[in-house]
Amino acid sequence: MRQDDDIQIVNLLFARQESGLKKLEEKYNKYCLTIANRILFDNEDSKECVNDAWLKIWNSIPPNRPENLAGYLAKIVRNLALNCYEKKHAAKRGGGQVEMSYDELSECLAGKGRVDENLEKNELSCIISKFLKQKGEQKRTIFIQRYFYFAEVSDIADRMGMKESSVRSALSRMRKELKNYLEQEGIAI
């Protein structure tokens, strides 16, 4: 049923029907606010970010016809929230989940430039996707929750029914494995 709803929403948006935007907002508003809030920690900024996402979706469908609407929307909201975060925190660094996640990943992704710039490169994204496909569902979920959605370790542990120390340990092992994998793929560390 969920996939059918998404197909209907995409079809409505593709036909430029505003009802598609209303259905999108009804179904995904809470999901999008959660993503934005994990990055921004500010309800007003998060609401503004999500409103910007609706416009971006409206302008991108058509020509795009996403097969995974939730993932497509999550990426748009995440990128808008990161842009908002960067603008607000350009002068001050440290303390938030975004910085902690980037700091953790920097040990295996740092090269020239900032980690968040490296994450946007298509080649690197493809290689990381290949790496994650080799992992079990639990490890993949932990990694994505932490480094894509910027979830706190305690939240991941609760969601996965694990101890925080087990989540931290799994993340640490995966970062080391990712570093080795990237080196094997010829990515300069």
Image (cartoon, helix red, strand yellow):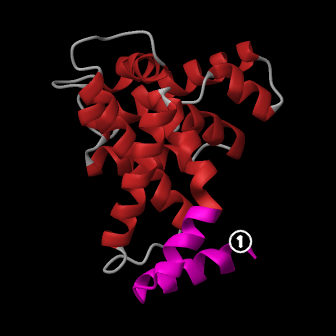
> Does 20 appear in magenta?
yes
Secondary structure beneath dot 1 equals helix
Locate residue 151 relative to residue 187 in the image: left or right.
right
Q: Main secondary structure of the magenta part?
A: helix
Where in the figure is residue 75, as x and y percent of width and height?
43, 52
For label 1, the crowd category at 10 Å Cα-Cα, with few meaning under 14, some 14 to 19 and many 20 or more, is: few
Q: What residue appears at the point 66 percent right and 77 percent down from the top-left corner?
A: 5
Where in the figure is residue 15, as x and y percent of width and height?
42, 89
For the N terminus, give its image quadrant.
bottom right
Camera-side residue of 167 and 90? 90
Q: What residue appears at the point 27 percent right and 11 percent down from the top-left corner?
A: 92
Locate residue 114 relative to residue 24 in the image: left or right.
left
Res 28 seen here: yes
Is the residue 65 above or below the residue 179 in the image?
below
Where in the figure is residue 171, as x and y percent of width and height?
58, 23
Is the residue 71 above or below the residue 145 in the image?
below
Locate residue 14 relative to residue 37 in the image: left or right.
left
Q: What residue appears at the point 32 percent right and 40 percent down from the top-left corner?
A: 185
Magenta residue span: 1-26
Mark 1 is on which residue type? Arg
Please identify the quarter of the rendering in which residue 64 is found: bottom left
> Going by the picture, which residue comes out furthest to the right?
161
- The residue beneath circle 1 is 2
For the C terminus, give its image quadrant.
top left
Camera-side residue of 59 and 104? 59
Where in the figure is residue 156, as x and y percent of width and height?
69, 29
> Does 62 appear in magenta?
no
> Going by the picture, which residue comes out furthest to the left?
112
Q: What residue appears at the point 40 percent right and 18 percent down from the top-left corner?
A: 99
